[in-house]
């Protein structure tokens, strides 16, 4: 039989064992809470949608890293930048590429009314670009008019000749959306002498191939007036001087046209290496609603 002293000793030992067990359990629980979880990239891990995991860059669980995220399209973004962003994505590496690419475009750039219009018989690409192929290179965007909730943006995409598109936008729920796209005719009021000067030199240099083309193609392309063509054919003007240089420039820039009634002029800056610049002034005449080049003067 155990006396009272022995019972007391056993009771104290039991308390000590229980206390040690509690302390061990608390320590293990704290270690689990502070433990860093390393996930092998090659392993398949199923994560509950309700769990937020911060891995280095605070990646949102709903973000698809293979799909670009649209920039903020709030009231502070200009309509022309919104249209540029749209076409940068459209002509970029993500699209055309499949349904997922168009889903991103549909959700971020296009209005419901425009999507309904696109249900017609024309190819989707035609509705969006008025063409079925990517432009050669140049894409420019100009804001025509913007009100509180609407905007018109002129998009110029360079093919053999510029293809101009009038993009209509609406501002709804603090976001711009493309509401319609109109394919403009060659004699559109938006086809300016500056635009034609750019087209002419891209044609003269063979587009993206950057080489001079035969003059007969310039003649047939309908850029020049009959009187300027006659000057060239009669030997009064050397067709090799259309660029004011025998070399192909690295790039070209064009000033805004100076328009007076039915005449206009555009100054072209042809840029070469070593900061060399050649200036050519293109003279235009308006005939039957279309601007044509009537003369080219080489400036020093």
Image (tube, rainbow, N blue to C red):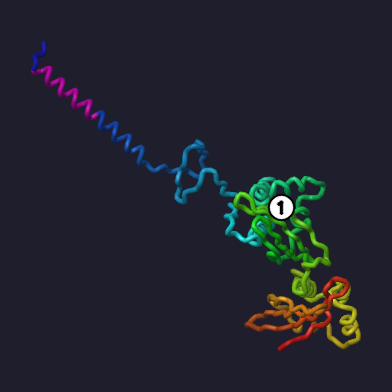
Residue 156 image offset from top left, x and y in percent = 73, 65
**Circle 1: is it few (<14), some (14-19), or many (20+) Cα within 10 Å?**
many
Q: Is residue 49 left or right of residue 81?
A: left
Disc 1, SS: strand
Q: Quadrant of residue 239?
A: bottom right
Q: Is residue 188 magenta?
A: no
Residue at position x 74%, y 69% in the image: 208
- In the rendered image, is residue 141 in sight? no
Residue 112 image offset from top left, x and y in percent = 70, 46
Please state, as top left, top right, bottom left or bottom right, where the C terminus lies in the image: bottom right
Q: Which residue is mark 1?
A: 179
Residue at position x 46%, y 43% in the image: 53
Residue at position x 18%, y 27% in the image: 16
- In the rendered image, is residue 260 in sight? yes
> What range of the chain is rendered magenta?
5-20
In the rendered view, tell whether residue 237 sits above or below residue 43: below
Q: Quadrant of residue 240?
A: bottom right
Residue 71 image offset from top left, x and y in percent = 58, 55
Residue 298 image offset from top left, x and y in percent = 76, 86
Please state, as top left, top right, bottom left or bottom right, where the N terminus lies in the image: top left
In the image, farthest residue toward the front = 148
């Amino acid at each position: 039989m155990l006396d009272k002293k022995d019972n007391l000793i056993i009771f104290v030992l039991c308390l000590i064992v229980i206390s040690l067990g509690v302390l061990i359990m608390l320590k293990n629980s704290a270690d689990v809470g502070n433990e860093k979880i390393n996930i092998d990239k090659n392993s398949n891990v199923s994560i509950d949608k309700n769990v937020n995991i911060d891995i280095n860059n605070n990646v949102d669980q709903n973000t698809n890293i293979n799909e670009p995220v649209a920039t903020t399209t709030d009231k502070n973004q200009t309509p022309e930048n919104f249209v540029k962003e749209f076409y940068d994505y459209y002509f970029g590496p993500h699209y055309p590429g499949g349904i997922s690419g168009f889903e991103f475009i549909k959700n971020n750039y296009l209005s419901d009314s425009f999507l309904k219009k696109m249900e017609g018989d024309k190819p989707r690409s035609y509705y969006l670009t008025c063409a079925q192929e990517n432009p050669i290179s140049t894409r420019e965007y100009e804001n025509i008019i913007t009100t509180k909730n609407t905007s018109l943006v002129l998009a110029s995409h360079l093919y053999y000749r510029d293809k101009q598109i009038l993009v209509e936008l609406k501002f709804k729920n603090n976001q711009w959306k493309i509401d319609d796209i109109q394919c403009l005719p060659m004699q559109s009021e938006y086809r300016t002498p500056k635009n034609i000067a750019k087209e002419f030199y891209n044609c003269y240099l063979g587009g993206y191939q950057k080489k001079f083309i035969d003059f007969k193609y310039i003649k047939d392309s309908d850029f020049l007036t009959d009187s300027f063509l006659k000057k060239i054919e009669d030997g009064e003007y050397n067709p090799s001087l259309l660029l004011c240089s025998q070399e192909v420039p690295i790039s070209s820039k064009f000033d805004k046209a100076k328009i007076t009634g039915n005449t206009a002029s555009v100054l072209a800056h042809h840029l070469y290496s070593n900061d060399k610049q050649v200036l050519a002034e293109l003279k235009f005449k308006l005939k039957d609603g279309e601007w044509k080049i009537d003369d080219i003067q080489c400036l020093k």
